Amino acid sequence: MESAINIDIKAIQHIGIPVTNIVNSAIFYSKLGFANAMERPFVHNGEQGTCVMMRRGDMIIELYQMPDSVLPEIASRKDGHIDHVAFDVPDIDDAYATVKAGGFNILEPAPVFLQFWRNGCKYFNITGPDGERLEFNQIL
């Protein structure tokens, strides 16, 4: 077994779930005690989607509704609706360099900035042995 890389992961930051109706999903999770902590639009392949971060205590579920052109594929999924698990890291650039040096399959050529939260966030993804996506994310 290979040795672990020395990366500073503080906790699971959020779990990302693609949804087909952001309003219905936000209502569902609010009934479980989650509150809307942030809502922002995003662009995917030139089309607009919506992201809502639902928080309950230290737990965050990222609900995101992709643009209409992608919704049929999401609606047809039978299993595997959780899209990614995100790890909270204190320094995204250090995490990127460490993961890259460790030989992992990184999906982005550099950390990506999103205007989420108050000051934005940066993230990048790797894939695991079965194609699962693991996101490293720093809230700025």
Image (cartoon, rainbow, N blue to C red):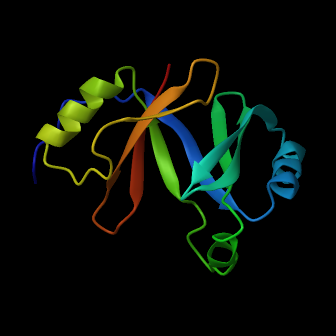
Position above or below: 94 against 13: above
Examine the rendering and report whether any part of residue 13 can be seen.
yes
Locate the N terminus and report the quarter of the image it occupies.
bottom left
Q: Quadrant of residue 119?
A: top right
Position above or below: 75 against 99: below
Name the one closer to the observer, 72 or 133: 72
What residue is at 34 percent from the left and 21 percent from the top?
91
What residue is at 59 percent from the left and 76 percent from the top?
79
Indicate the position of residue 43 as horizontal and vertical percent values: 60, 49
Count of numbered marks: 0
Name the side, left or right, on which 101 lies relative to 76.
left
Q: Quadrant of residue 39?
A: top right
Q: Quadrant of residue 65?
A: bottom right
Name the one closer to the observer, 29 or 125: 125
Indicate the position of residue 45 as horizontal and vertical percent values: 54, 59
Name the one closer to the observer, 6 or 73: 73
What residue is at 10 percent from the left and 50 percent from the top?
2
Indicate the position of residue 32 as horizontal and vertical percent values: 84, 45
Examine the rendering and report whether any part of residue 8 can be seen.
no
Name the side, left or right, on which 70 lies relative to 20.
left
Indicate the position of residue 52 as horizontal and vertical percent values: 73, 42
What residue is at 80 percent from the left and 35 percent from the top?
36
Position above or below: 116 against 90: below
